[in-house]
Amino acid sequence: MSDVDNGEMYEDVEVEVTDDEGEQPATNVPIQQPKATPSPKPTAPRTPGRVAPSAAVAELVHTPPEARAAAGVDTLTPAKNPFTTRGNWSPSTFSQIGVVFPTLTPKDETTNELTRATRPECRYWKAPIKFSYSTFTSSTIRFNNVHVPYHNGNGYGSSYVYIALPGFVASQFAEAGKTRRPTVVNEKSLVPDEQRWWRIANNVEGKFGAINRETSLFHAKPLQTIFETTGRGVTVNVVVQFMAKANTEDKSNLKPTTSFTLAMEVVRAYIVDVGVDVQMPVRVSKAKPKVEPLAVARDVATDSLMKRLSELGL
């Protein structure tokens, strides 16, 4: 019979004791019998040629879904909250996240004295976008290893930044938003990019920083100084909140045809690398329209007129 021990196969051999054909034992001297070997413990029958898996293989086969998700394997687990730690999204995993746009109501109107002074004809509304998965909901979502490019614009790094989110995220926001009203997901000042979803984040001062390994405390870092010193971008793990916005331009109420636009706010951004070469987004050109001259030859002032104007101090 056969048995398995430590992944190897052994054969049990029956020992048959016989007289040696060349010599006879001495008279009255008993033949020494071999000591009996205890039988190994019985085991379940194994398929011929199969061996027990190594520890590494066993771990790979039996790793629970939660551990695979934590290791970055492309799966979500209904019993695990993806909004607390997950940030390495793929089209497959993010498609399982519900993007829930608000139903804008009168309590969501943000028209105030400042907006009335700058654009008195307009009214504004804003409310947060929620995220859901299984039994979990969240007002924030994390994106790991996203890039913030270097830019030398006035206020960049202290007031606002450009953040490159995965391109597939934009399409899911667009699909979710249009179930309520027309939705514009791209920044109006930036040219759309299929690979990256460029978002502008305002009010970022004090939001970017690093975690001290010894104390586990967050320390804000001046992003503008990093840009000026390195001349390059940074990589961050960022926690953000999205807002759905709408406005009308004739002091009217919201209509079904009024479009959603989006705003993104940085809750916290953890810097994981600096001095990174990051391509800037392409900005929409805002060239001033060329004004064609309307004067003709007969409009040119005469020398006497110019002299008279000079005498008048003009």
Image (cartoon, rainbow, N blue to C red):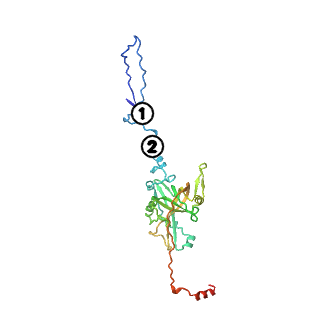
Q: What residue did someone put label 1 on?
A: 8
Query: What quarter of the picture does the N terminus occupy?
Result: top left
Q: Earlier in the sequence, mark 1 or mark 2?
A: 1
- Asked if residue 128 shows in the view, the reply is no
Identify the residue at image location x=45%, y=43%: 60
Q: Nearer the viewer, residue 27 or 112?
A: 27
Q: Quadrant of residue 176?
A: bottom left
Determine the residue located farthest toward the top in the rendered image: 27
Q: Cα distance, mark 1 to mark 2? A: 21 Å
Q: As shown in the figure, which amino acid type bears the numbered disc 1? A: Glu
SS class, disc 2: helix
Tag 2: residue type? Leu
Between 257 and 263, the residue placed more toward the observer is 263
Snapshot quadrant of residue 274 = bottom right
Estimate the x, y position of residue 5 in percent, counting from the top left: 43, 32
Residue 60 circle label:
2
Residue occupying image coordinates x 52% and y 69%: 124
Q: Residues within 10 Å of mark 2 (few under 14, many from 20)?
A: few
Q: What's the residue at 42%, 33% (across, down)?
A: 8
Disc 1 residue crowd, few under 14, some 14–19, many 20+, Cα 10 Å: few
Is residue 28 shown above or below 209? Answer: above
Please say whether residue 67 is visible from this viewpoint: yes
- At numbered mark 1, what does the secondary structure look like: helix, strand or loop? strand
Q: Do callouts 1 and 2 mark residues in contact (Cβ within 8 Å)? A: no
- Where residue 301 appears, x then y in whole percent? 56, 86
Position of residue 295 in the picture relative to residue 12 (left or right): right
Q: Position of residue 136 (x, y in %)?
A: 48, 54
Which quadrant would the C terminus be assigned to in this image?
Answer: bottom right
